[in-house]
Amino acid sequence: MTLVIVTTTGLCNLNCSYCGGSFPSAIVPARETYDLDMLINFIRKLRADVAFYGGEPLLNPGLIMKIMDKLGDNRRYIIQTNGTLFRNLPLDYWSRFDSILLSIDGRENVNDHYRGGGVYKTVLKTAKMLRSAEYKGDLIARMTLWYLSDVYQDVTHLLNLGLFDHVHWQLNVIWTEHWNFMRWARDSYLPGIEKLVSLWAKEMEKGCVLGIVPFLGIMKVALFGEWRSPPCGAGKDTFTVLPNGKIIACPIAVDSPWAYVGNLADQSLRHVEIGEPCTSCKYFKYCGGRCLYAYKERLWGEEGFQEVCYVTKETIRYILKAEEKVKKLIEKGIINKKELYYPPYDNTTEIIP
Ligand code: SF4
Ligand code: SF4
């Protein structure tokens, strides 16, 4: 199924330290400048699901409501939001989302260091309001991990809150300045992944499948043989429409010529693919080339690309160590194989951190 990501605005009300806040308005305008019917036709033609993205998508809630009203409920809706503008959208629209991804990086001090003072509490308030409104979809904590993050502590912290169905993370690599990633990966991240995999497997022995998205997504390949490249679908079957009507392969590649794939005005669309060295890599089936943006841009050079590959391969190896145990638990009926079919549709979780 195709996914159309609609960037509702280039504006953001936060200024997270690894992101930099709003896009320049000349590149990503604050409001849509296209005729809405062109977007609706494009989505209908592709029979696509729709994800709302920004900037902060809830700074243009009018567009979200108009799209959902025009398209009706015969497709899935997803939103990635920083979770600070709950009141900008009426509750009946919130309840129509199949997945809601709230950005939160883990423990309060870590989150607020990256995202700003008070943000952690505000996001949790949003999660609690969705829970008390008996939100039935998939509530996902979407984390960014950086130098202060401890993957084991921050992921288990979010799981233990009992608010989120799933926790997903992305590493802050390639798209920012080159930081001491390898040292952090060796000292903190990879040991944390090993510990987290061991917790994941132990909980499964008790019949509990923790909603750790990268683990589920990689195990899905092992159990069901389903995968795509890149795992987020960018340029393959996921496309982003900017407020100026440009269609791009990846929602963050707003000004990269390689990412420009079409325009709403002529409803054109081309595909972008990942090639070597990924297609010959032993881990391609699981990794899928990881991230199209990182693959194309190589902002940390070849050395930085290899650093991230090393960490990706180690992560996949740790997760696959649990494969035999998971298969046995399924055979014994302790866990249900269906619970490991995740994500069940493209919900914008990129799988490979
Ligand atoms: S590990 Fe690196 S080389 Fe291998 S598929 Fe992933 S991104 Fe490509
Ligand atoms: S994983 Fe990479 S290519 Fe995919 S959406 Fe994220 S930044 Fe874009």
Image (spheres, rainbow, N blue to C red):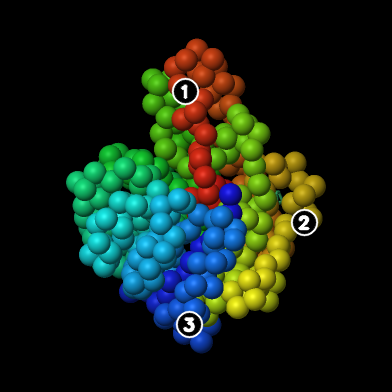
**Mark on residue 61?**
none
Name which residue lies at 51% across and 87% down: 26
Q: Tag 1 or tag 2, which sits nearer the N-term?
A: 2
CA gap between label 2 and label 3 equals 35 Å
Numbered-mark total: 3
| Residue designated by label 2 | 275
**Mark on residue 336?**
1
| Residue designated by label 3 | 33
Residue 242 placed where, x, y %?
52, 74
Residue 139 placed where, x, y %?
35, 47
Q: Secondary structure at mark 1?
A: loop
CA gap between label 2 and label 1 equals 36 Å
Q: Amino acid at mark 1?
A: Asn
Q: Amino acid at mark 2?
A: Gly
Q: For the residues carrying marks 2 and 1, which lies nearer the camera in this image?
A: 1
Residue 256 seen: no
Q: Amino acid at mark 3?
A: Thr
Compared to residue 30, the image places residue 320 above or below, namely above
Categorize mark 3 by other alpha carbons within 10 Å: few (<14), some (14-19), many (20+).
few
Residue 261 located left or right of residue 10: right
Name which residue lies at 65% across and 53% down: 230
Q: Is mark 1 within 8 Å of ligand 2?
A: no
Q: For the residues carrying marks 1 and 3, which lies nearer the camera in this image?
A: 3
Q: Tag 3 or tag 2, which sits nearer the N-term?
A: 3
Q: Secondary structure at mark 2?
A: loop
